[in-house]
Amino acid sequence: MAPKRKSNPPPPYSALDLPKMLEVFEQNGFEAKQYHIDEFQRKLHKTGYPDLNDFDWHSFPQQFVDLVMSNFKTHITKVVLNQTSSNETTTKLLVELHDGHRVESVIMRHETGRTTLCVSSQVGCQMGCTFCATGTMGIIGNLSAGEILEQLVHADRVKKIRNIVFMGMGEPLNNFENVKAAVTAMVNTKQFGLAFGHVTVSTVGVTPKIRRLTAEMPFVNLALSLHAPNQEMRSAIVPAAKAYKIEGLIEALDDHMKTPLRRGKAEGGEVSNSKKKVRKAMIQYTMLEGPTATFECAHQLGKLCEKKNIIVNLIPYNTTDVKDKFQCPSMEHIEAFQKIVMGYGLYVFIRKTMGEDIAGACGQLVLQKEEEEKKELDVEDAGIGKNIGGGGEEKVAKKMGKRRKGRGKEKSGEGLE
């Protein structure tokens, strides 16, 4: 088993990690001016995150320069494998952290032209979903805010990213502070400047932390990995679900999307609800033949979600090497399931599988290093950041209308605009 990560590692830290930078300044009795902090992050982003030895320091105080240079690096992670699916819609990046642990992030290219990055927030995951490959790893440790943000920097160099989804390795809400800091930087106009509605946090469902997310980050989209329509079934396939009742989760999800966006500054970004746009949260539901894909389950799911600000995203099960063997229902069965749920007045999409041939699809993210070493084929043998694969084009259906309109259509990626 891989060793656990240290909760307080020594420097160098990521220069993108603003909370850590402020902590270092405070520990050294240096009160940096907000202007210099903002200017450093702005210039770092504008110049493409160069090595700090090549950074233009002329407008910064000497103590600021000394503390940053001695405690931070622009990159404390590196891409050790860049693998693209055969149809070129998906690229999986294997990212090595400063301590040698590795995480995966996935770039998804959509027919509309937008590009989504699926980021990891932890090494492994403690939620233990029985059908998910990442759950087999257990929890090894949290990523820092800088390590999360560096995934975006690496991905931007492959393809400019428009949307972020926290649907990679780990449970984001179990790494709340670092995820919050990363999201804040993503929407900060002095840093990455992403639109508020283009960031989605996905959770297996920790009700108190969903409530906290609503209070502290009301501008992010929220997705709940539900996967079953009742408490008994959900507890069987999502062990962490035993602690939180399904009705409470749905209520918290609905309340999050009803929350008005407060006007005012939010760490460098303007939070506004002037357009009064009705937001919808997402329910992610993995279709497992037998356990969760029966038509009875479809009716239960429809009743659970009706009259809520919710979109249902049906995910065809992607084969993973887990103890409990599951199968994916036929597409005809999934479409019939979809039709039943739509009958309750809900928007229901079937997620288009992307990246399955490179184990980059939903539920497939798990590190293969130990197994590959046994075969004497470590990923490093492929070359640092080497690009593997390619060819073909993605075909994505148009967005469906309400109820029966567009029955059976698929939607790629995360499903939220």
Image (cartoon, helix red, strand yellow):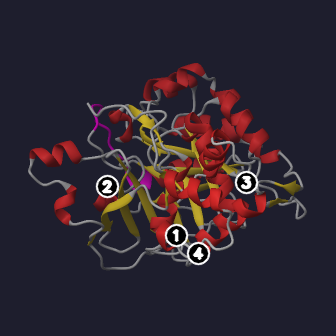
Q: CA distance from mark 4 to mark 2?
A: 41 Å
Q: Amino acid at mark 1?
A: Tyr
Membership of 327 in magenta stretch: yes
List the single residue furthest toward the front.
62
Q: Amino acid at mark 2?
A: Ala
- As for residue 241 lying within the magenta part, the answer is no
Task: Give left or right: position of 43 versus 370.
Answer: right
The quarter of the rendered structure image containing the N terminus is: top left
According to the picture, the residue beneath numbered tag 1 turns out to be 49
In the image, residue 276 above or below residue 319: below
Nearest to the observer: residue 251 or residue 208: 208
Question: Which of the marked residues, 4 or 2, is nearer the chain's N terminus?
Answer: 4
Instruction: Name the kind of residue labelled 3 in the image.
Output: Ala
Q: Separation of disc 2 and disc 1 at Cα? A: 29 Å
**Residue nearest the viewer, comparing 282 with 141:** 141
Q: Which residue is mark 2?
A: 359
- The magenta span reads 322-333
Q: Is residue 215 left or right of residue 53?
A: right
| Viewer-nearest of discs 1 and 3 | 3
Dot 3: few (<14), some (14–19), or many (≥20) neighbours within 10 Å? some
